[in-house]
């Protein structure tokens, strides 16, 4: 770890840059919304006008990028792959296409039921228990969200009358290594929830100087003696309209 994570390379140009693989698209929406739930996106585009304007390519398949409109503003909408490295690769390519602001949302595991249960979680910081962020910003235990982004997100929650909490979350690479010992450590650090991409996403946004807004909805619960999966495998579909409305309001307010 000392020879990799703690030796940050400040070079802005890499051997392979996003512009080497992805062309800029004239007229590409400045604001892009992304989530990790394919179900939420499919449900939204079935009920609303959406046009495919680009694609993200990988060995996993093709991910369409849609252009949608809300409150008279055109926005992009696309699926993010799960996990920091894959998620960030998609963000890099979306930014290369022309995105200037990103709204990202997804599910998380609740670590503090009394504070976060039944509320939307707006991350103020993320514990960097993953690898991707260390290639974008120097090593540190946590990475903070921009206050301006937090303010916009909280204002939208209040406008919509949706309960929320602002606090720290834990980003991990390994969902099957969330041991009781580590969970207790993260709870003592003040983490409200655990997920897999926020620290990585915050880091690439900071590196590329892109405003980044994010929020999470609780799925499973880890704040008990035994794991409660709750509606984890629903992938947010049952409340997808609610989450999309939050994201759209954030996009309109950017």
Image (tube, grey):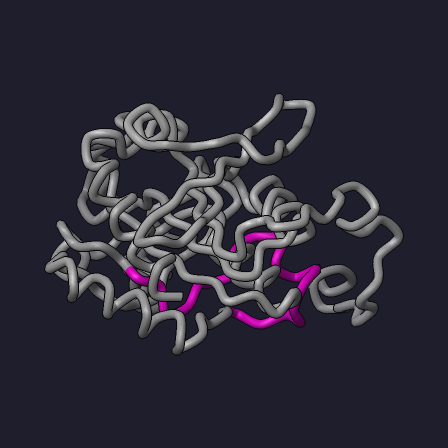
Q: Residue at the far right: name it.
A: 15
The residue lying at 44 percent from left, 35 percent from top is 176
Out of 72 and 161, give the one closest to the viewer: 72
Q: How many marks?
A: 0
The residue lying at 83 percent from left, 68 percent from top is 11
Q: Which residues are magenta?
A: 122-141
Out of 182 and 240, give the one closest to the viewer: 240
- Say left or right for 81 vs 239: right
Relative height, residue 174 to residue 71 (above, below): above
Q: Quadrant of residue 164?
A: bottom left
Inspect the magenta stretch and tell me whether residue 129 lies in it.
Answer: yes
Inspect the magenta stretch and tell me whether residue 161 lies in it.
Answer: no
Q: Position of residue 63 (x, y in %)?
A: 56, 29
Q: Position of residue 254 (x, y in %)?
A: 40, 66
Q: Position of residue 127 (x, y in %)?
A: 46, 63
Q: Quadrant of residue 40?
A: top left
């Amino acid at each position: 770890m000392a020879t990799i994570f703690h030796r940050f390379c400040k070079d802005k140009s890499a051997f392979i840059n996003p512009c080497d693989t992805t062309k800029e698209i004239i007229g590409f929406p400045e604001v892009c919304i992304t989530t990790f739930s394919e179900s939420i996106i499919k449900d939204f585009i079935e009920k609303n006008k959406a046009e495919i304007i680009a694609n993200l390519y990988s060995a996993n398949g093709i991910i369409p990028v849609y252009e949608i409109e809300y409150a008279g503003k055109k926005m992009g909408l696309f699926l993010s792959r799960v996990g920091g490295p894959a998620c960030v690769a998609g963000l890099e390519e979306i930014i290369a296409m022309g995105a200037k602001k990103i709204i990202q949302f997804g599910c998380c595991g609740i670590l503090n039921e009394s504070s976060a249960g039944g509320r939307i979680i707006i991350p103020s910081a993320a514990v960097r228990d993953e690898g991707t962020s260390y290639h974008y910003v120097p090593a540190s235990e946590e990475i903070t969200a921009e206050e301006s982004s937090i303010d916009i997100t909280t204002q939208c929650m209040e406008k919509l009358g949706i309960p929320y909490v602002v606090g720290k979350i834990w980003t991990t690479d390994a969902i099957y290594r969330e041991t009781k010992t580590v969970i207790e450590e993260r709870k003592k650090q003040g983490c409200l929830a655990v997920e897999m991409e926020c620290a990585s996403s915050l880091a690439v946004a900071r590196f590329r100087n892109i405003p980044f807004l994010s929020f999470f909805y609780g799925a499973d619960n880890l704040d008990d003696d035994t794991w409660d999966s709750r509606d984890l495998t629903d992938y947010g579909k049952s409340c997808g309209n609610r989450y999309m409305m939050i994201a759209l309001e954030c996009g309109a307010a950017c």
